[in-house]
Image: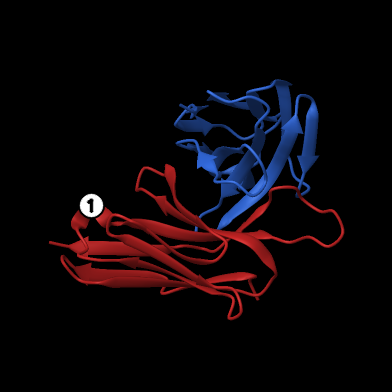
Chain colours: A red, B blue
Amino acid sequence: KNEVEQSPQNLTAQEGEFITINCSYSVGISALHWLQQHPGGGIVSLFMLSSGKKKHGRLIATINIQEKHSSLHITASHPRDSAVYICAVKKIWNYGGSQGNLIFGKGTKLSVKP
Amino acid sequence: SQTIHQWPATLVQPVGSPLSLECTVEGTSNPNLYWYRQAAGRGLQLLFYSVGIGQISSEVPQNLSASRPQDRQFILSSKKLLLSDSGFYLCAWRGQPNTEAFFGQGTRLTVV
């Protein structure tokens, strides 16, 4: 089982719809990242969370540390939001381990139709 | 402001040929640098990370190597490419392990 699971794998929405992408993880973490990967492959960091909620424009990210779950919400979706959204966690290592290693989900491919 | 440059954007190489992908960071000093690979249908996987000049840690055994000849330069190399080396390679940097990560635009490598 992957340590970071995302759902859904693919998501198609109509312009204007409210979108939710979920991320669950099974390890202790110090931070969780939401990333956006455009069709050309470039990745942009959207949020880094360790607790609570963050908002940037139409994007909202929440995290529940106890439930090991995070959600990325997009309000009033637009075709330009079409991309792959990736959840990544910074795992807490008990015995050294990789400094700075992020464990990535496989991504959610979002298509927003006009 | 900090920026990260990665090149080339796309690359088609024959099996057995060498590889050199370069990543440079501007606007920061002593960054933690990372090379990731994204194979088709799979998530990003950490290949190498570096916390300083000449300091390279490898996460998975493979046909690739990395070097950090300068503080803000990270190079991914191979002496002889394999078909299985095909994929999308991303360079990233962070100031500290628990800070936001910044990614390059990536290199799509096809080994033929």
Q: Which residue in the rendered view is the most extreme toward the top?
A: B70
Is there any visible trace of residue B18 in the rendered image? no
Q: Amino acid at mark 1?
A: Arg
Is A100 displayed left or right of B24 in the figure? Answer: right
Above or below, comparing residue A21 to residue B35 in the picture: below
Looking at the image, which is closer to me, A70 or A54?
A54
Q: Residue at x 74, y 35 (%)?
A: B51
Q: Which residue in the rendered view is the most extreme toward the front?
A: A52
Which quarter of the figure is the C terminus of chain A placed in? bottom left
Q: Which residue in the rendered view is the most extreme toward the bottom?
A: A67
Which quarter of the figure is the N terminus of chain A placed in? bottom right
Q: Residue at x 60, y 59 (%)?
A: A31
Residue B74's image quarter? Answer: top right
The picture places residue A23, in percent across and down from the top left corner, at 50, 71
The picture places residue A24, in percent across and down from the top left corner, at 55, 74
Residue A92's image quarter? Answer: bottom right
Above or below, comparing residue A87 to residue B96 in the picture: below
The picture places residue B105, in percent across and down from the top left corner, at 45, 36
Above or below, comparing residue B72 to residue A103 in the picture: above
Q: Which residue is mark 1?
A: A80
Q: Which residue in the rendered view is the most extreme toward the right?
A: A95
SS for callout 1: helix
Residue A110's image quarter? Answer: bottom left
Instruction: Say how many tags the image has.
Output: 1
The picture places residue A44, in percent across and down from the top left corner, at 43, 45
Q: Residue at x 61, y 79 (%)?
A: A66
Looking at the image, which is closer to me, A42 or B8?
A42
Q: Residue at x 65, y 32 (%)?
A: B31
